[in-house]
Image (cartoon, grey):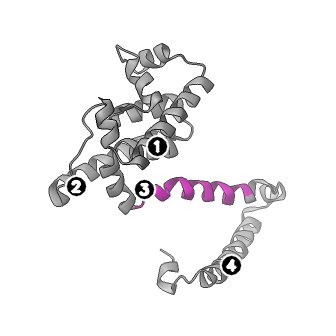
Amino acid sequence: MARIFTDLAAELTSSALHVAAETAGVPLRMAGALFLEPEQLQSLAPQQRRMMRETGLYLRDLREVAGLTLAELSEALDLKDHSLLEAVERGTATLSFELVLRLAALLARHDPIPFIVRFVRTYNPEIWRVLEAWGIGRLPAQFERERQFLNVYRRHDAARKLSDEGFAKVLMFTNAAFEMSLHFAAEHEGLKDKELAIE
């Protein structure tokens, strides 16, 4: 399942690159990882520098939880020199999208989308703006909502003992209750009927 999401993110980003290059003239900085000199770091917006520091600390935490040294993680990524990852953890280097995907497969294989979103947003802001416009930033929230909805079913052992006919009735009532609840909640948040249209 994680591999499917990783492949989806790669495919979306590839499409985004194509669209950005052909229609918006977006300057793309995706090709490779990059060590930043002090003057290059200073030229970045303060928010970008902060995001790089926080993402570097996040990567270090994930690596340490996985019980890996910088050298071991570099070897797993087939990097000859672990100084790149060391610089990323310090917030003084960027990662290519290819390396982000490889890191996700190693350190976040059970939940790759939030990992990929965070790293793309930090290291490839131009691509992130395109992906965000497409709605990819909402994927982690949607996966979490679906998980919570599924947990409602999982908490009720009796539902597993129902016949197909009995479960169909529960599903029908659940659907009606959900639609009514959705209508009231959406009305409270000022959403229009067309935004609630069932596909």
How far apart in space, not on screen, are marks 1 and 3 (Cα)? 22 Å
What kind of residue is marked 1?
Answer: Arg
Q: Is residue 62 above or below residue 18?
A: above
The disc label shown at residue 181, or none: 4
In the rendered image, residue 107 lying in the magenta stretch gets the answer: no
Q: Amino acid at mark 4?
A: Ser
4 and 2 marks in contact (CB < 8 Å)? no
Q: CA distance from mark 4 to mark 2?
A: 40 Å
Label 1 with label 3: CB-CB less than 8 Å: no
| Number of the front mark, 1 or 2 | 1
Which residue position holds label 3? 136
Q: Residue furthest right?
A: 158
- What crowding class fits label 2: few (fewer than 14 Cα within 10 Å), some (14-19), or many (20 or more)? some
**Comes first in the chain, label 4 or label 3:** 3
For marks 1 and 2, give the CA distance: 26 Å
In this rendered view, identify the residue nearer to me: 42 or 72.
42
Instruction: Read off the residue under disc 2.
Output: 20
Q: Which residues are magenta?
A: 135-151
The residue drawn where x is 61% and y is 58% is 146
Report the mark closest to the observer, 4 or 3: 3
At 47% from the left and 45% from the top, the residue drawn is: 118
The residue positioned 61% from the left and 54% from the top of the image is 144
Mark 4 or 2 closer to N-term?
2
Say which element carries label 4.
helix
Bin the neighbour count of mark 4 within 10 Å (Cα to Cα): few under 14, some 14-19, many 20 and up: few
**In the rendered structure, which disc, 1 or 3, sits on the residue that comes first in sequence?**
1
Q: What number is the disc on residue 50?
A: 1
Magenta span: chief secondary structure: helix
